[in-house]
Image: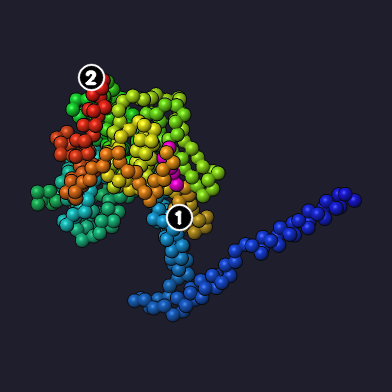
Amino acid sequence: MMQKSLTLFCIINLIITFYFWFQLKPSYDKEIQDFNFTVQMIQNQYVDESHQKVSSQKLFNYALRGLLSDLDSNTYYMEPEILKELTQITEGKIGGIGVVIEDNDSGLLILDTVPNAPAQAAGIEANDIIISVSDQDITEMDFKSSTSLIKGEIGTSVNIGILRDNQKQIFLVERQNYSLPSAKQCFILKEKFLYVVISEFSTSTADNFFERLENHEGKYEGIIIDVRENPGGLIHTAVEICDYFLPENKLIVSTVPRNPKHRSDYFSSSSKPKDLTTPLIILQDRNSASASELLAGSLRDNGRATIIGTQSFGKGSVQSVLHYPKSGNGFRITIAHYYTPANQKIHGVGITPDIEIPLDEGEYRKLQFRLKKFNVKIADFSEDPHITRAIEELESKLEPYK
């Protein structure tokens, strides 16, 4: 009798649960009707220049793109070709020739060549202008179209037409994967300060950075880490670099998804080598974003670094890439925001430097040009107001120990 009563009680509870679920769940009947009506009207009456009916698939792609586009600038829809290219890049299947370029009235100006990459090996040089790719004239193409011609399957070759000293030359270059050093510029300044540019936070950045430190071990008394123009990258890479400069069990960064209960806190470890005493300066600018801001904010909040420059970009969000199982399409969506150890929200705000030094547009343009290059001279740093101030700050930090 008790078992029957318990069974009846469970059934009644289940019925009540389903009743309230169906009452409370959102209904999209009206919205779906509006959507279907709009699709029908477009397919039946819309006229473009071709006078052809717009396919249902194309309309659905437009709808999904619109659904995601207004959420934030880092959330967006990806059609199969974009998703495929992203996957190939991640898996290392897309190759290039190894040039740093910018748009130019005459074609693509090569600012620099990547050390030991195919273009440099083929004889292409900085200040050359690319005017054709695979015998196609690119001088009238937009930047995206012309650069996409240069990239391609690893192991394939491409003819690069170069304008050098007003003479056209053709170089046959084989596309390859190449190592792009993300800690690419490294000098000893004033015979005692190590200056390192970190251009991105990729899987190899931390090892590249630590190799730079090791190669100059015993030669420096202060470190200047330059993340100006650095768009960011992998959070874990920035965390690894922060860990090197922080004592055990210090909060490095927190990522917070929609439910704050699922917050993830990243702490410094005790299992790796440390540098807890060398004075640090972080240089940032308006394009320092994401992992760059994490690095600067974390080391500053933990009392390990002074930030010099201008307000940073303010990109403090984490994204995930998802695939639709049948269509081959996908989308990128923001899943969390991250906060510095002082619980400062970065997204939409940025990091305020300890010492703010604005740059005029001329100075900023020179900075952008130099940071894109691999082959630079120490003399190129002499007119950089941020580096000049960083050296002064490091001198003042060392003064009490003299």
In the rendering, at what x and y percent does residue 238 appear?
A: 38, 37
- Residue furthest front in the image: 400
In the rendering, at what x and y percent does residue 151 appear?
A: 30, 50
Packing grade of label 2 (10 A; few <14, some 14-19, many >=20) is few
- Indicate the quadrant where residue 240 lies: top left
Residue pictured at 35% horizontal, 35% vertical: 300
**Pointer 2 with pointer 1, Cβ within 8 A:** no
- Indicate the quadrant where residue 97 lies: top left
Packing grade of label 1 (10 A; few <14, some 14-19, many >=20) is some
User: Please, what is the three-letter code of the amino acid marked with disc 2?
Assistant: Lys
Q: Could you tell whether 302 is left or right of 189 in the image? A: right
Q: Could you tell whether 188 is left or right of 322 in the image? A: left
Residue pictured at 39% horizontal, 33% vertical: 302
Mark number for residue 402? 2
User: Please, what is the three-letter code of the amino acid marked with disc 1?
Assistant: Phe
**What secondary structure prevails in the magenta region?**
strand
Q: Earlier in the sequence, mark 2 or mark 1?
A: 1
Element on which disc 1 rests: strand
Q: Nearer the viewer, residue 135 or 49?
A: 49
